[in-house]
Image (cartoon, rainbow, N blue to C red):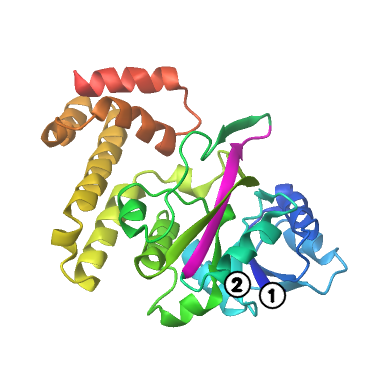
Amino acid sequence: MPLVSVIMNCRNSGKYLREAIDSVLAQTYSNWEIVFWDNQSTDDSSQIFKSYNDSRLKYFLAPEYSALGEARNHAMQQAKGDFIAFLDCDDLWFPQKLEKQIPLFDNDSVGLVICDTVFFNDRKDIRQLYKTRKPPVGHVFRELLGAYFISLETAVIRRSLLDEMDHWVDVRFQVIEEYDFFVRLGYRWEVAYVDEVLAKWRVHGASWTWSKPELFPAETRLFLNKLSATIPDFDTLYAKERHAVMTKIALQEAVIAWRRGSAGEARAILRPFRAENLSAMVISMWSLLFPFKTFDFANKVRVGLLS
């Protein structure tokens, strides 16, 4: 049983932390360690973590606060395992997650293994991610780039992949760092999938990602420019996927403009993309950027933007 390093980055996560830790302790696969990176928390997170009497739980206090991407890099530097898994302090695993995923790495071409997951809040389960449409597997760089489909709490990666990367999580990104990281992994390695719900991702208003929607378009443009500069003939070979990403950037900018009350600006942003199926995509993008708003309001936005 190879060692799996479970990366838990923490910043004032005491509210849900015990549930997350308990879900790792309940794993039927026992050879794991938790690398707990305390990013200068000021709540009771450190006390909660240190209350567990298990040598597999390893505590690291950041010397100073850093942005999440940099903090993830610091945590991964402490990992001793052959494989690295990720569990944020408000998410959960089901007991057989690692037991089901690790055997798929017997295929030497596989660098990343994911599973199905459920998005939930404190009241109910909201959506099963792959219930109606299964994710692609194998060499799926194009699919990851054009229609990203990975949820962090499901991911396990081969540790040796990090040795081949010139950088891990890009510290310039605040909201798309996972997208950038896993797309770059998918350029060289195959993705495998366990078709079972083995994790849960908690949706709540305190999430940093959802509090800064204006960062998505700017960071995604920078991401595309980075790929264009590092992958030979990227703009030509992946023109279709690049166009799909540019369409999403336009939708992000349009929804943000609409939210500011600038309907005319929003329509102008979308005008070059009139041939796209924007009706469905605006609703989808709204649910992504603002998951705590109702779909009724999203429909009103759609009508306003496309009229």
Front residue of 21 and 265: 21
- The reply to whether callout 2 and callout 1 are in contact (CB within 8 Å) is yes
Task: Give the residue at the far front of this rendering.
Answer: 107
Residue 14: image tag: none
Say whether residue 254 is magenta: no
Front residue of 182 and 208: 182
Can residue 271 be seen here? The reply is yes
What percent of the width, then of the height, locates residue 236?
A: 13, 60
Q: Which residue is mark 2?
A: 83
The secondary structure making up most of the magenta span is strand
Q: Amino acid at mark 2?
A: Phe
Answer few, some or many: residues within 10 Å of disc 1's Cα (few below 14, many 20 plus, some between 14 and 19).
Answer: some
Looking at the rendered image, the quarter that the N terminus falls into is bottom right
Answer few, some or many: residues within 10 Å of disc 2's Cα (few below 14, many 20 plus, some between 14 and 19).
Answer: many
Q: Secondary structure at mark 1?
A: loop
Q: Residue at x 37, y 80 (%)?
A: 166
What percent of the width, then of the height, locates residue 235?
A: 15, 60
The residues bearing labels 2 and 1 have C-alpha atoms spaced at a distance of 7 Å
Q: Residue at x 65, y 80 (%)?
A: 80
Above or below, 230 against 147 in this view is below
Can residue 10 be seen here? The reply is no
Instruction: Tell me where the magenta segment starts and ends, as one range.
Output: 110-122
Q: Which residue is mark 1?
A: 3
Q: Amino acid at mark 1?
A: Leu
Q: Residue at x 37, y 32 (%)?
A: 284
Q: Is residue 217 left or right of residue 234?
A: right
What percent of the width, then of the height, locates residue 209?
A: 47, 48
When asked about the image quadrant of residue 254, the answer is top left
